[in-house]
Image (cartoon, rainbow, N blue to C red):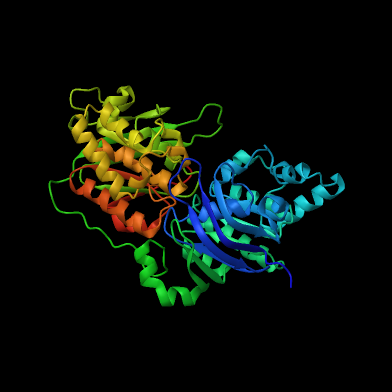
Amino acid sequence: MPAPAIEARGWGWRHAGRREWALRGLDLRIEVGERVLLLGPSGAGKSTLLAAIAGLLEGGEAEGVLLVDGLPARAAREQVAILFQDPESQLVMARAGDEVAFGLENRCVPTSEIWPRVDEALARVGFPYGRDRPTDALSGGEQQRLALAGTLALHPGILLLDEPTANLDPRGASLLTDALRRVQEGGPRTLVMVEHRVAAALPLVERAVVLEAGGGAIADGELAAVFAARGDELAAAGVWVPDRPLRRTLRRRGAEPEPLLVAEGLGYRYPGAVDEALRDVKVELRSGEALAVTGPNGSGKSTLALLLGGLLRPSAGKVRATPTLAGTLANDPGRWTAGELAARIGSVFQDPEHQFLAGSVADEMAIGPRQAGMDQSTARARVDELLVRLHLAHLADANPFTLSGGEKRRLSVATALAAGPSVLVLDEPTFGQDRRTAAELLALLAAQRDAGAAVCFVTHDAGFAEALADRTVSLAAG
C-alpha cells in the first residue's frame, strides 16, 4: 500500500518560548491527490501545520510523528512547495522569468531544462506578460500568480497554500483562483489550503479538516457535509462559513458629524518612481462616521492611509486637521510629535510588523497610552480590556514577532485603539481574522465611531465594509 502524501500521528508543536502548544494530538491522513481545506479559528495552528509539512519549523518542541511521502517532513522538502499570504515577501528577482528560474537554479536543475519549465509554469498560471516583465511593475494579483509559477516550476507533488488571496483585491483573488483551478486540472497534485475567504476556496477543495487551538482535528469530512452538520457550531467558534455574513452595524444617531481631518488635492510620488502613487485626492474624515477606502491592488489605498495618519509628507496638496482635532497644535499632522499624534490619530499599517517596538504584547499595547500622556492605571485598564476582547490575553508576555498573522493584525489594531484617539486610520484591519475576531473588531470600531471618533479603514473585505461603513471612497490608479 503506497504511503499517504501526509500523515500525522499524535503530532504536536510548541513554539519556542510559549507555554501553550500550537497544535497537539493531531491525527491526520491525506492521500496523494486529495484537495483539503484547513479550517479553524485564528491561532488554531493552521499556518503552523503548513510550515511543518513544508519542513520549515525550527527552534520549538515537537511530539508525535509527521511524515511526508513516508519520510520525516524535513527530508521530503523537495516534494513540497508553499505559497504564502504576501506575494511581495516571496519575490527576490527583478524580472519575472528570473524569479521563476531562481528555485530551479537553487536545485541545480540542468540549464537546458530551466527555461522550458519557466515558460510552462508562466503559461499554466495565466501570467499575462513575458519573462522580462519587471516584478516591481506587477499588481498584487500578478505577483501572486508569479509566485505560484515559481512553485509549480519545481514540479512539487504537494502544494501548500497559506491564505493566498488574503492581500488581493477581488479581481486578483478571482484570477488566482482560476489559475489554481487550471493547475489542479493539469494532473493529480495534493493540495492543502488555508483560506479565510471560504467561498473562494470551494471550487478548489473537496475535503475540510477543522483544527482546534492547542488540540487536533475536531471535524474531518466532505466539505458540504461538514458545513451542513456543524455550520452553526463552526461559525460560533470563529470559522468563516458560507452564507453567514457579519451583521450590519447602523450608526447611532448622535451629534451631527463634523470634519476632523481634511485632505485636498492630495498627491504623492515615491522617491525614484516615475508615476504618482496618488494624485488629486479629496476626502474628509468626520466625527461619528466610518469611511471605507476600497479599490484594486496598487490604486494608492495604503499610501492614502499613511498620508492621513501624518506618517508621510504629501508631494502635492495637504492634509489639514480641523481645530476640533488639533486643538492648540498646528493644523498639519505631519508636524506633530509622536505623543501628539498618538493621542489624536491612531494608525494601523498594512504590515503590522512595521510598527512593533516592544518585547511583549502587553508592553507594545502600552506604548500609545504612555506617549499620549495617559495615567498609568487608566492605561493598564485599557490594555487589559483590549487583551481580553481581542483574544490576546494568553499572549500578553509573548514577543509580538512570534504571533500568528491574525494575532499580529489584532495587536496592531489594539495599539491604535489603546490611546483612545479621535481619528483611527486602519489598513486592512480584518486581514487574517476568523469570523469571531472579525466580529469583535467590528464591535470595537463601531463603538469608537458611535462615541464620536472618525474611523477610516482600507479594505478588500466587502462584507466588513458593508457591515461598518457609513461612506465609501473608491480609488482607481491613484
Which quadrant would residue 303 be assigned to in this image? top left
Residue drawn at (23%, 34%), measured in percent from left and top? 379
Q: Is residue 469 left or right of residue 28?
A: left
Relative to 432, does residue 264 appear above or below in the rendering?
above
Residue closer to the observer: 441 or 8: 8
In the image, residue 294 lies at what x, y percent?
Answer: 40, 49
Residue closer to the observer: 250 or 279: 250
Q: From this viewpoint, is residue 332 visible?
A: no
Q: Is residue 412 left or right of residue 217?
A: left
Which quadrant would residue 354 be assigned to in this image? top left
In the image, residue 309 lies at what x, y percent?
Answer: 34, 34
Residue drawn at (41%, 34%), measured in percent from left and top? 355
Q: Is residue 156 left or right of residue 42?
A: right
Which quadrant would residue 386 be assigned to in this image? top left
Q: Is residue 259 left or right of residue 72?
A: left
Q: From this viewpoint, is residue 193 visible?
A: yes
Q: Quadrant of the N terminus?
A: bottom right
Residue closer to the observer: 15 or 477: 15
In the image, residue 61 lies at what x, y percent?
Answer: 54, 47
In the image, residue 126 lies at what x, y percent?
Answer: 66, 57
Q: How many marks?
A: 0
